[in-house]
Amino acid sequence: MSFLYYLRAPAKRNLPQMSSVTEGKPPSPEPIFEAVWGFAVTRVLTTAVDLDVFTAIARGHHTVDDLVKDRSCSKRGLAMLLHALTALKYLVATSGGYSLSPVSAAFLSKASPHYIGAYLLHNTHESWFPWAQLADVVRGGRPARQSVHGNQPDAVFFSQLVENRLILASQRLTSSCWATSVTGRAPCGHKSCSTVRSARCGKEVRS
């Protein structure tokens, strides 16, 4: 069965819902299926960011044919990717093609000042292979990769890490500003967004 099969609504998959044993119903294997296919969700999202699909759509390339030309991809492969992104709610299918969801428009398009795609790519590229070696790590008790610090620190890793952490920090501040503009009160409880940025506020604001 394909990955897209498990993205459909549970009712359409003909799989029983997770239920309590006390109700006399058998447990559902759905959490297992979701865990097994979790890696596919990461790969779909990372591939779309790597191919800059979200930015292309933000710049007016909405149809499959237009995106194929702009991104230099195969029509069959890109159509499948767009289908998966729609099922995951990163894209919205329209009569004119595809448009970005609010989350994708805010954080996955380079046209947005709040773009965090670089963090996503960095984190996935750095973590994918080491996590695939988890069984060997558990057996041998040794890390899957060489330490990024010590006698020969990885300068590239740390420069990317700092850059991406700064991006995420700016997103937290921006989120607090948005919350303040809508509710009149920042997530920390103060009424002023400037208070959130000041040293007087001891509460960390997270998006």
Image (spheres, rainbow, N blue to C red):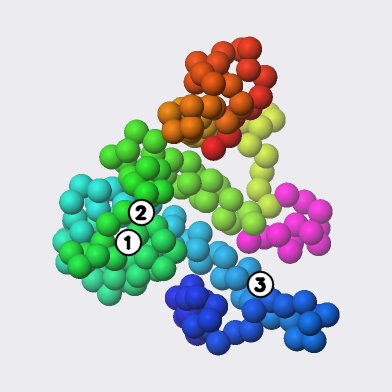
Secondary structure under badge 3?
Answer: helix
- Between 203 and 24, the one lying in front of the other is 24
Kindly check if marks 1 and 3 are in contact, taking CB atoms under 8 A apart as contact: no
Tell me which amino acid carries mark 2. Ser
| Quarter where residue 137 is shown | bottom right
Q: How far apart in space, not on screen, are marks 2 and 1 (Cα)?
A: 6 Å
Tell me, yes or no, whether the two marked residues, 2 and 1, touch with CB atoms within 8 Å. Answer: yes
Residue that protrudes farthest toward the front in the picture: 184
The residue located at (43%, 40%) in the rendering is: 116
The residue singled out by tag 3 in the image is 31
Q: Is residue 89 left or right of residue 37?
A: left
**In this rendering, does residue 163 appear at all?**
no
Q: Secondary structure at mark 2?
A: loop
Q: Which residues are magenta?
A: 132-143
Judged left or right of residue 90, residue 40 is: right
Q: Amino acid at mark 1?
A: Val
Q: Which numbered disc, 1 or 3, marks the residue that appears first in the sequence? A: 3
Please tell me how crowded label 1 is: few (under 14), some (14-19), or many (20+) other residues with Cα within 10 Å: some
Q: Which residue is mark 1?
A: 92
Residue 29, above or below 78:
below
What residue sits right under mark 2 in the picture? Answer: 101
